[in-house]
Image (cartoon, rainbow, N blue to C red):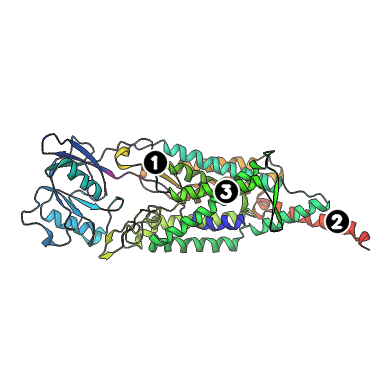
Amino acid sequence: MGWVSGWRGAAVGLLLLGVCQVWAEEGILHAVSNDSNLGVKQYCVMYDSKWMPFPKSLDNATEFQLKILTSTKLCNWTDVPAEGIKDKLLVVMRGNCTFIRKAQIAQRNFAKALLVATVDRIFSPSGNLSDFEKPNIPVALISYDDVLSMQKMLGDHISGTLYSPPVPTFDYSILIIFLIAVGTVAFGSYWSGMAEYGSTSYSPSDSRLQTHEENKTKESAATLTPVTVVIFVIVCSAMIVLLYFFYKWLVYLVIGIFALAAAVSLYNCLVALVKRIPYWKCKFPCDKISIEIRLLFLAVFCTAVSATWVAFRNEDRWVWILHDCLGVAFCLNFMKTLKMPHFKSCVILLVLLLIYDVFFVFISPYFTKNHESIMVEVAAGSGSTGEKSTGNYLMGLTVEPVAHNEKLPVVIRVPRLVTSVATICGMPFSLLGFGDIIVPGLLVAYCRRFDLQTNTSNIYFILCTIAYAVGMVLTFIALILTSMAQPALLYLVPCTLITCAVTAWSRREMKMFWAGNGYEMMNRVGTTSEETVETLTEPASE
């Protein structure tokens, strides 16, 4: 049952295989009251630097008079007031047309900047620049609540300045992501080997033979063959396309699946520790079975933890810690329960998912109407209109806004530790998809089991883990140099596969490593043991 739940969750978890750092496009509106003794306030805005970059400091920015027209959405030329908007920092409401359309009307009426007020959570504005001229005035989103607060605190005569403090190229959140990823892969792979060989015995005794046969059944039920690998990748591709077009509905399905899978995974990870506790071993009957009280308490605890995450999943300040703990438990449980039977299946899985990753990050923009990556759009909580989950209005299509900007819970999230606008705009995060841990982790786990089969002193496991760490370092280097989202498997797959292949070839074990002969040997041992027991028990039965 635990494996089934983990598999369903993994089908969603592998949707996001790209690692990306959420490069902040936050800006600051420095608002000053022109009335005496009303002071100065700063507000968070979001902008798209590809349109019109903001000055990097307040000293280099120009101050303009604010003109607040939240009674209009500025979608028609007739929305411009008779007194004009020349040289103004204009504030209008979001809706009915694209951001670019609003900017086009504003700049042709000589406005100096445009702020679009939204009742939802603010985000970076986007649109298809191929259909319109590129805005040459700053365009940003601001919370409508902030506009109301500004008028209440600063009065009706306000001057404003837009600027965006520089974000450090390197942030220590990358190091934390690295430690979580490498640690999870190493521990999950080591646990996978111990779980299989710590409980398997080839002794011909009846009780041990039964245990061996049960383990063989579990193994065959949780094994990815080449055929199932291909089917799995096809399902993942279909799911991410569906999420792209129907994000605001399917995101809640993904949240529910993750909550269930996370509770099961956390239970499976903690049950081994709880069973070492010498207390609360008493049992009580329940429908012809006996349940230990301590395991019942553990199940309630894991369910409560998962429910707590569901209830507070949008509280960025602290819930990311709980989310990451559940995510690590999910990855560990998946790597422990799913087995790759041979290196051949590992190669097929990693290569197909590498193609999948690169396609949806780099090639999919050529097929989307807003020319954005499907992978990045889904990871950022967007959809086919650019902001499916936040109700943007693009290409003349109106999308109903939703109450929250829900995110897919299939990434490890670590807040950036150094950012000058964090206190105003909230916490930007660095992200790593679960798939970037699980997919290479399955190969590392196979190396660990192969080491145990052939008594090779963990040489494959150690080298493949190091190769994974090197691949992560290359990913982060590319991330920093390009300042854009990176498909991590582009670096992880070559590093791990080449390392394993070279190791097997240099040790002259490629044929065994490729075909998984260790599993065939184990099955033959089990068969021999079974035949021996049948021979021993046959006279007694007569």
Q: Is residue 332 visible?
A: no
Say what amino acid the circle numbered 1 marks: Arg
Q: CA distance from mark 2 to mark 1?
A: 61 Å
Over which residues does the magenta segment extend?
Answer: 20-26
Label 1 sits on a secondary structure element that is loop
Camera-side residue: 378 or 69? Answer: 69
Q: Is residue 345 visible?
A: yes
Label 2 sits on a secondary structure element that is helix
Say what amino acid the circle numbered 3 marks: Val
Residue at horizontal 22 percent and vertical 44 percent from the top: 149
Which of the two labelled residues, at mark 1 and mark 3, occupies the earlier sequence position?
3
Crowd class of label 3 (few under 14; some 14 to 19; many from 20; radius 10 Å): few
Which of the two labelled residues, at mark 2 and mark 1, occupies the earlier sequence position?
1
Instruction: Please provide percent x and percent y for residue 239.
Output: 46, 62
Find residue 528 and report its image quarter.
bottom right
Which of the two labelled residues, at mark 3 and mark 2, occupies the earlier sequence position?
3
Q: Which residue is mark 2?
A: 533
The N terminus lies in quadrant: bottom right
Instruction: Please provide percent x and percent y for residue 421.
Output: 30, 38
Camera-side residue: 59 or 77? Answer: 77
Q: Which residue is mark 3?
A: 300
Left or right, 516 with reference to 180 = right
Q: What's the mark number on residue 317?
A: 1
Mark in front: 3 vs 2: 3
Left or right, 459 with reference to 496 = right
Say what amino acid the circle numbered 2 marks: Val
Instruction: Please provide percent x and percent y for residue 75.
Output: 18, 61
Residue 11 covered by magenta stretch:
no
Crowd class of label 2 (few under 14; some 14 to 19; many from 20; radius 10 Å): some
Q: CA distance from mark 3 to mark 2?
A: 42 Å
